[in-house]
Amino acid sequence: MLKGFKQFVLRGNVVDLAVGIVIGAGFSGIVNSFVKDFVTPFLGIFIKSSDFSSLYFKINGSRFLVGDFINSLISFILIAVIVYFFVVIPMNALISRMSYEPPADPTTKKCPECLSEIPKAAKRCAFCGQSLGNTQ
């Protein structure tokens, strides 16, 4: 039982996923800090508020934390942009370079008389009427 669990945990995909989650959580913390410490004060300049994240409005005594939501939205957008430009685009480029497809077999041939394109299995040229015999 433990041997199967050990084999499952040490499988490449599980370890890669775990590393990705840990690094993603750390990266998320960095981006959240960047938004809270740099972006929020910068946006606060334009809305005349020193702490943009504390913006809210009340309806029937309920507080809606608009500033906090906007901070989270900015953090998400920054993470998505960084992942797209630094992970997705390079991986797509690498995959397209790695995948090589040999060219397909030609389905046509040239007539030796008039040099027009004719089907490969043709025995007579449709353009000049030249008998092609068994040339392929």
Image (cartoon, rainbow, N blue to C red):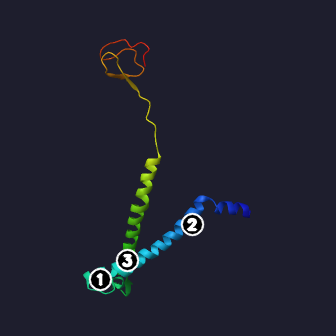
Q: Nearer the viewer, residue 35 or 59?
A: 35
Which is closer to the viewer, label 2 or label 3? 2
Q: Earlier in the sequence, mark 2 or mark 3?
A: 2
Residue type at tag 3: Asn
Task: Please state the horizontal and vertical placement of residue 95, each as a whole percent of the image.
Answer: 46, 50
Q: Which class describes the residues within 10 Å of circle 1: few (<14), some (14-19), or many (20+)?
A: some
Classify 72 as above or below 16: below
Q: Work out whether residue 66 can be spotted.
A: no
Q: Which class describes the residues within 10 Å of circle 3: few (<14), some (14-19), or many (20+)?
A: some
* CA separation in Å, label 1 and label 3: 12 Å
Numbered circle sitting on residue 18:
2
Q: Which class describes the residues within 10 Å of circle 2: few (<14), some (14-19), or many (20+)?
A: few
Numbered circle sitting on residue 19:
none
Name the quadrant containing residue 78: bottom left
* Side of 24 where 43 appears, left or right: left
Classify 47 as above or below 135: below
* Side of 114 where 9 appears, left or right: right
Classify 14 as above or below 44: above
- Residue that numbered label 1 is attached to: 44
Task: Please state the horizontal and vertical placement of residue 122, each as a whole percent of the image.
Answer: 40, 18
* Residue at image coords 31%, 87%: 50
